[in-house]
Amino acid sequence: MSDPVRPPVLPDVAGDQAQAARLLDWVGMAEIALPLRIEDGDGQAVTVPARADIGVNLIDPDARGIHMSRLYLHLQDALARETLGRDTLARVLADCIDSQRGLADRVQLTLKYGQLLRRRALASDHSGWKTYPIELDAVLGPDGLALTLTLSVEYSSTCPASAALSRQLNAARFAVDFAGSAPSFDAVHDWLASPRGLAATPHAQRSRATVRLRLSPDVDALPVLSLIDALELALGTPVQTAVKREDEQAFAALNAEHLMFCEDAARRVAAVLTADPRVARFEATVAHFESLHAHDAVARVSG
């Protein structure tokens, strides 16, 4: 049996009259797979896999639907050709609105991908890769382009209260072991290096800072890498990749230097974002995934 002949004009029921006419806020597609060109940690452009949600408002109440396939086709390769930035996004989103031929005047694109960065060890010559989850929300409408960036960094948090309680137990054991004596320098040194010199250890846990930033209108290049670096520097104890014994010891020293409650961590994050002129507004959440409790300690701050 031969295939039927394709008719010269295909039906397009999306152009039919809507039965229950009204405007719609957002119509589109979610979780589209696409390639994305971004900057890596060495200043080079690389292509990474991403997921995208894209949709427009439907401003013609009588139109049954939008031209969804046009959005999909406009998006598929556009962000793989140029490094992600304000100008590229503005051009791609304007094309998406134009593709709807009067049905929409606002488009929203959300991109989700992983920023892969190589991180050096603290003391040894090793290094390893770490992925930072990134979400970029871009909205183009009559008021222009608005960019909102969300990213997370993980770090270690050692409880100041637990550290103080541990020091008290260590001091109490020292008093018991050396009661009535005047120990020499060598005796104290050897005691501190022995199991008796550690009566208790403070509890620490992996923690996460998640920030959502409205970028200033004059920001073109996305400040993902510099923001990650600034946040990790302020928190002081970013989780590590390659770790040898000397790196683990250096990490332990950093934890002792940066004792913090979730409130302390939230203030450190806020100080970084407040001082950055590229950030018009921010919301930050820090969560310490407690090793002492069965619940988490959380703090939020905005500015």
Image (cartoon, rainbow, N blue to C red):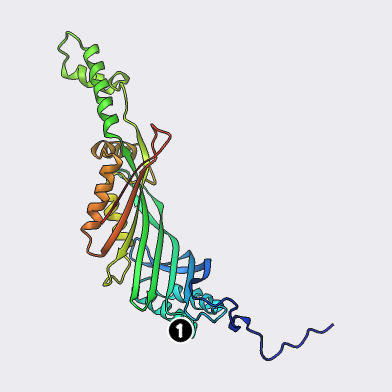
The C terminus sits in image quarter: bottom left
The single residue placed furthest to the front in the displayed view is 20
Q: Secondary structure at mark 1?
A: helix
Q: Up-down: is 274 above or below 215?
A: above
10 left or right of 286 in image: right
The location of residue 60, given as percent across then percent down, is: 49, 81
Residue 45 lies, with reference to residue 259, above or below; the image says below
Q: Amino acid at mark 1?
A: Asp
Residue 172 position in % (x across, y down): 24, 17
Quadrant containing the N terminus is bottom right
Q: Is residue 259 left or right of residue 115?
A: left
Q: Nearer the viewer, residue 57 or 271?
A: 57
Does residue 288 appear in this view?
yes
Q: Quadrant of residue 162?
A: top left
Q: How many marks?
A: 1
Q: Position of residue 220 (x, y in %)?
A: 30, 72
* Side of 113 relative to 230 (left or right): right
Label 1 crowd bin: few (<14), some (14–19), many (20+), radius 10 Å: some
| Residue found at the far bottom of this picture | 8
Height in image: 303 above or below 144?
A: above
Q: Quadrant of residue 254?
A: top left
Q: Which residue is mark 1?
A: 98
Residue for point 28% across, 71% down: 217
Residue beneath the point at 49% across and 67% down: 53
Q: Image point 21% across, 12% down: which residue?
A: 178
Query: Residue 176 lies in what quarter of the image?
Result: top left
Whether residue 244 is visible to the viewer of this picture, yes or no, is no
Q: Nearer the viewer, residue 154 or 135?
A: 135
